[in-house]
Amino acid sequence: MAKQFGFLVDSDRCVGCFTCAMACKNQYHQEKGVVWRQVYPLTQEIYPHRERAFYSLACNQCEHPACLEVCPVSAYYKREADGIVVHEQDKCIGCGNCIRSCPFGAPKYNPTLKKAEKCSFCWQRIDAGLTPMCVLSCPVDAIAVIDTTEPDAPGLLRDVPGFPRQPSLNPSVRFRLPKQPVVIRREDI
Amino acid sequence: MSTYELPLVLFTVLGQLSIGLVCIAALCRAAAPAGVPQSLFREWSVAGVVLGAGIVASIFHLGHPGGMVRTLANLETAWLSREALTLGIFAALLVTGLFLMRQDKESRALVAATCVAGLAVIFSMGMTYSPPSFPAVNNILPFVFFMITAALLGSGAAAAFTPEHARPLVLRILDTSLIIGLVIYLAVPCIWLSGGEIMKQTGQLWLSSPLFWGRIGIGLALPLVVLWTMKKVPVWLWGLILAGELMGRALFFAGTVHTATNMGGLY
């Protein structure tokens, strides 16, 4: 594989505005209740501060995708050139096996079409030399497209609290964790 | 797995009942004294009807049932495709066996092959329902659960057809399966409580569910008491075991926690 595209999720920058999720919705007009990108707040156990922190997550374009492996009708394939996992909805029979099997909850059930669907990484836009809509729309540049075959930039992590660790699938996502808030005490002033 | 998935509950339970009945009936015949004529036709006929009902039920969980024939497309990696293949082989062998039995031409090799195919179906089912997204059952447990179902329902159903000489064997299989089922179903959720966050949540959900205690009480403990006191298998007892299995399977699908439900939280 020449490249393996994935998302960089910069939790230090993310403000939880949901613009990425809305941009995705505007682009693809998913059915009501079907969300390809979701913004998850970190719980108090992981980020115990008054400030909040978030992960904006969609399909992680895994190196060994569970959806692709379990689909009985081969409705998924992985692009050789960039590792994007594509779901061919025409082939889908709506068995729900990919939905049950993906540990990240990326494939969703479309109740109108009675088929699964998921984030496409905006592969049509990628092919046209554009960036995915979520990346384009983020007002604080908290999401970016990265090539995970390249060495990780300093400060980026693969396994972080609040995200299921699945080394056998090797999700193509990297995180930058939020900084700890600066505590200013009276004696510091 | 978040919803009760009733078509899958019926498909898996009825499929395992059919396989259990085929295998235990074959075992009873193998253990029969020499010279005792014994046809498997009645047991296998019932198993065939039950399997057919299960397959019909499975269609209802598909968004597009017309695509069912294409489920063999990914035998390379998908256990669901392998499940469909092994189920097809089992059904074909079962029908062939029935056809031969009707003509008084039973084949021991065919009976053995059908039993092996049935066990392969249960193994494939176990692998299909143990994906990485459900840490509590991402292991051998689904296969173990399904084998218990096959042994319980198979021996319970076989008891209705069993001739006198094989009754102690069927009683022993049912008795042992009930004890093993009781121990496993009580121990497993408690073990989950000491696991990771998702496993712990699954254990808590199971232990707090009426379905779990219904399954333990109605499907395992009560039948065991009845069996020990009456020393035989009344027909209604099989109904209790079936009710317990259906409750247990509904809990398996609805009460097993998915990793994605805790995104942003502890794992």
Image (tube, helix red, strand yellow):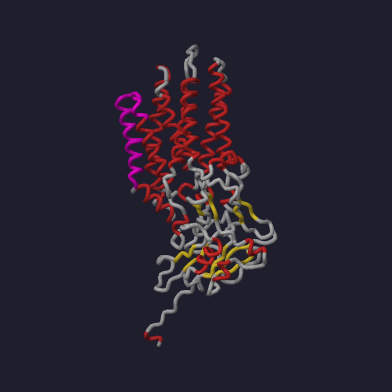
In the picture, the quarter occupied by the C terminus of chain A is bottom left
Q: Give how far across and how far down residue B53 sits, in percent.
A: 47, 32
Q: Residue at x 67, y 67 (%)?
A: A129
Q: Give how far across and how far down residue B145 sits, in percent.
A: 45, 39
Residue B43 to residue A25: above or below: above
Q: Give how far across and how far down residue A18 sits, in percent.
A: 48, 68
Residue furthest out toward the left: B229
Q: Residue at x 48, y 63 (%)?
A: A161
Q: Nearer the viewer, residue B19 or B192?
A: B19
Q: Quadrant of residue B71?
A: top right
Q: Nearer the viewer, residue B19 or B231?
A: B19
Q: Nearer the viewer, residue B126 or B166?
A: B126
Residue B23 seen in this snapshot: no
Stretch in magenta: B209-238
Residue A100 seen in this snapshot: yes
Residue B266 to residue B170: above or below: below
Looking at the magenta stretch, what is its main secondary structure?
helix
Q: Is residue B233 magenta?
A: yes
Q: Quadrant of residue A7?
A: bottom right
Horizontal arrangement in the rendering, residue A68 relative to residue B49 (left or right): right
